[in-house]
Image (tube, rainbow, N blue to C red):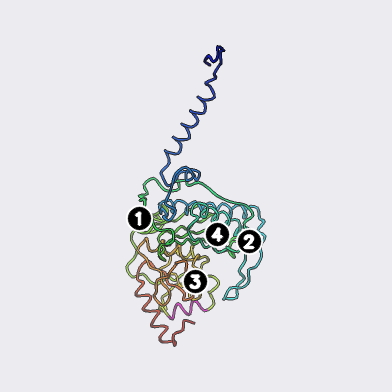
Amino acid sequence: MSEAKMNGRSIRINRLPATIVAILLTIVLVYFLNFHQEERPAIYGMLRSENPSRVNLRKMLIAAIQAAQRGGLEVLDVARSRQLKERSKGKTDEGVNDPFTDADGRSHCVMKQGLQRIFPRVQIFSEEDKEHCKQAHGYDLDPTVLHETAQIPDVTVNAQDVTVWVDPLDATKEFTEELYEYVTTMVCVAVAGRPIIGVIHSPFNGQTAWAWVGNSMSEYLSNLHPQHSPNNPAPIITVSRSHTAGAKDLARGIFGDNVSLLTAAGAGYKVLQVVANNATAYLHTSKIKKWDICAGDAILHALGGTMTTLNDQLINYGPEESPVNTEGLLATLEQHDEYMDKLSKYREAHNGKLA
């Protein structure tokens, strides 16, 4: 409190409110400056100018991991509540029921809206895009989702070159059957049509496999992949549970009588079986959606593996392409050319067919 004189009168000035305001502004400024530039809270973007036509891939990796994990929390919450609110979206090409649950919808809303809020200029495709989200969801970037030894560079690309593919709940049918080991949530970032960031999160064991091609990967993924694999192992082919009829005969026809078959559900889960060397290849002979396979494609590529169509073509994940891959897929860590050669010879001997 101080005094000043005006027109012969004493005026008391209280300095306390001004001091408090100055302290609070200092705290806020220090808070913002202590964040990495691309990890500061969203409101910070209102206080500084950015180039809206560029996207920071480090920031996108962090957001993709968070989205998959937050979607996984929604899946867990619905599973624990036992209120699935299941309904059918129809039949798959194999004649299997294609269910939809409250977990699919809630995970979709959290994952897509959270990503869209941070990257409003990036095209994001989700399996459940037809679902109406009743409330807005968002989150600020949390760099602690990256392990301490991760070497993540600051790289920016044109926003128009980026496409994000979101699978809010892979293996919904198995989710309704409480076969939770197959369930994953996935995010993939493609640049110019090629997958470069892949995230596969398993809600029921809490593990997240992620990779940025040419840069880094999660400790879980690194530990899941054996450093040494046997030379020319006998083929172990993982295929969908819904395709088991005839799959064994087909696998034997292509890869020989010593082939083993690993039936599983969920494209994300099957890719992780290849990563862990529990399977030497993942084979899918019918059409499949790109949000099912993009994250796995990026992860395999980061580990030196390959995913192609059955015509041995890389899959394009650009925004102008169809969301459906109609040409099947073969995914391997090793021996891709050898396996593709066997597959091609089988097709030639059966008038170009695999059935």
Q: Are marks 2 and 3 in contact (CB under 8 Å)?
A: no
The disc, 1 or 2, on the residue closer to the chain's N-terminal end is: 2
Q: Is residue 10 left or right of residue 230?
A: right
Q: Is residue 27 above or below residue 308?
A: above
Q: Which mark is residue 198?
A: none
Residue at point 45%, 39% (across, down)? 32
Comparing 220 with 191, the one in front is 191
Q: Report the Cα–Cα distance between label 1 and label 3.
A: 29 Å
Residue where numbered disc 4 is placed: 168
Q: Report the Cα–Cα distance between label 2 and label 3.
A: 25 Å
Amino acid beneath label 2: Thr
The disc, 1 or 3, on the residue closer to the chain's N-terminal end is: 1
Secondary element at image label 1: loop
Residue where numbered disc 3 is placed: 322
Q: Report the Cα–Cα distance between label 2 and label 4.
A: 11 Å
Residue at point 44%, 61% (across, down)? 160
Q: Nearer the viewer, mark 1 or mark 3?
A: 3
Q: Are marks 2 and 4 in contact (CB under 8 Å)?
A: no
- Residue 255 percent across, percent down from the top left: 40, 77
Check if residue 245 falls in the magenta segment.
Answer: no
Residue where numbered disc 2 is placed: 101
Q: Report the Cα–Cα distance between label 1 and label 2.
A: 36 Å
Q: Is residue 230 left or right of residue 274?
A: left
Amino acid beneath label 1: Asn
Q: Main secondary structure of the magenta part?
A: helix
Residue where numbered disc 1 is placed: 215
Q: Report the Cα–Cα distance between label 1 and label 4.
A: 25 Å
Secondary element at image label 2: loop
